[in-house]
Image (spheres, helix red, strand yellow):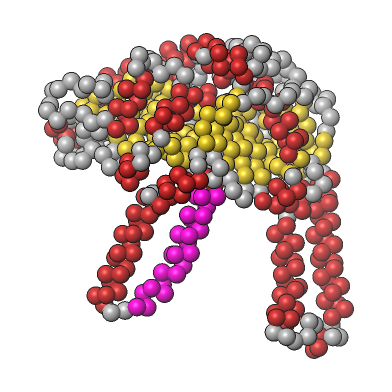
Amino acid sequence: MSLENNATESLPGKPEPTVDGDWNRVHPASPFVRGWVALAAVGFFFGRDAFERMLQGRDFVDPNLSGRAPWLLAGGAVVLLLTVGGFILSWYFTRYQVAEGYVRVNTGFLFKQQRQARLDRVQAIDIVQPLLARIFGLAELKFEVADAGESAVRLAYLPLDQAKQLRATILARAAGVVSGPETAAEVPEAPEHVVLSVPPSRLIGSLLLSEQTVGILLGAAVVVTTSVLFDNNAIFLALIPGILGIAASYWSSFNKGYNFTAAISPDGIRLRYGLLDTQAQTLPPGRIQALMVAQPPLWRIFGWYRIHVNVAGYGLAASTDGARTMLLPVGLKPEVLRMMSLVLPDPGVEDPERVFTAGLNGLGPVQPNTATSDGFTTTPRRARLLAPLGWRRNGFLATKTALLIRSGRWWHTLVMVPHQRTQSMALHQGPWARRFRVADLVLHTTAGPVSPRVFQADVEQAVELFDQQAARAREARKRQTSEQWLAQVAPQAPELAATLTDQPAQPAPPQTSPQQEDRHDG
């Protein structure tokens, strides 16, 4: 018997919470939805030969096997019964409970396992519906908790309405809409307001103009040129696996980005997407640690951008699953600014549109020692040999609430890190950087696709930014009174809070964490 607790560790001297809530079972069809592959494998193994014989017009059963047919059928029946029996036992021993500020899931009948997550440390809850689960009207709940490298709790499967109800109950506590130790009572699902949706035509266009398409066209040109020069057409046969892989990649991106919708609610930003496998994701903006806006070269024709985020609790798995960290797959600049305003309600500048536009598309001055008109401090002209194309784009700007980092001449990127989300920092300076008296400043946040890094800043400016950013992070964490999104947004946008909920936000005690700072010269 093994016991896992991926949410928190017990504090010394603190009594363990008692378990007094009702234990519930998942839907009876859950094991069959999870294990349909095993059933399909059993059917394929025993029915492949018969199916092939039927297609060839021969007897359904091989006459040579007439004497062994009863034994084969008996063996197949035993395997089928064992598989179904395992499904039933798996369902019977899978139970979940919401009580005393915890959500717990018990699984296993031979090797038992319990997973639990503290409700006040839940970072996000996703509702996932694979195609077969959608047919049965079922959904899976994935709980993301602080300090967990993977989902601490996966609850599969519940009826869709029940899954939504359970998610609303838990997120109401995390968002600050409901206070108190008990969350077992049902809470109506929080209202929402849709802020944007991505039309399928734009999604298809973004895939056709993506970096992947550019690489495919360049590779095709190389293949055609090589085939003509060496008069060898066999090379095209070797491309068939690659073509199938590329088609699968395009389909995966389209399937995950189809029908993308973003809405706001008291429990956070709600994202819905998917064609065959649908997913409903809730991101409390307070859990977003870093944000990156990117624009590939061909997207500039239509003014398109995408947004990726680092979310606390998603862990290293978020780096490989791009859909879960995608805040906007493709959108116009007004939509980008709208989503950025949800993550950072107070940008800390008087004219945020001008500042963010400069971060998305701006360039620094050509002449040295010239003040930048957009406020960004860029790479000094003496270091232009290190980045011949990007030295005017590389730059940073610290507002009252966040650090903005822009880079890339062809692939434009803008990274935004709220001051209180800076966990640690490091200064990096290699031999060539020392020669040109520049250094990189790296900000460390949670794992994810965003890697905040100030490229090739003047050494004195980099050291000054290092010290100032450390002070800003400490002060920001002192001013932060709550990790709950509604409690933070209400002072900045009271009309939003009044629209989404009639209950006032309940602030939590201040939460602070030590900051680590180090400098590396290499």
Which of 293 and 381 lies nearest the eye of the viewer? 293
Which of 231 and 205 lies nearest the eye of the viewer? 205
The residue stretch that appears in magenta = 233-255
495 on left or right of 293: right
Residue that appears at 70% across and 81% down = 55
Prevailing secondary structure of the magenta residues:
helix
Residue 42 on image: x %, y %: 75, 66
Q: Is residue 51 at least partly visible in the picture?
A: yes
277 on left or right of 451: right
- Looking at the rendered structure, the number of numbered marks drawn on it comes to 0
Residue 515 sits above or below residue 334 on the image? above
Residue that appears at 65% across and 24% down = 191
Image quadrant where residue 46 sits: bottom right
Residue 312 on image: x %, y %: 53, 30
Image quadrant where residue 271 sits: top right
Residue 31 sits above or below residue 53 on the image? above
Residue that appears at 36% across and 22% down = 353
Q: Is 251 a magenta residue?
A: yes
Q: Is 209 a magenta residue?
A: no
Quarter of the figure that contains the C terminus: top left
Image quadrant where residue 378 sits: top left
Which of 76 and 197 lies nearest the eye of the viewer? 197
Residue that appears at 36% across and 20% down = 352
Residue 223 on image: x %, y %: 32, 68
Quarter of the figure that contains the N terminus: top right
Residue 201 on image: x %, y %: 47, 46
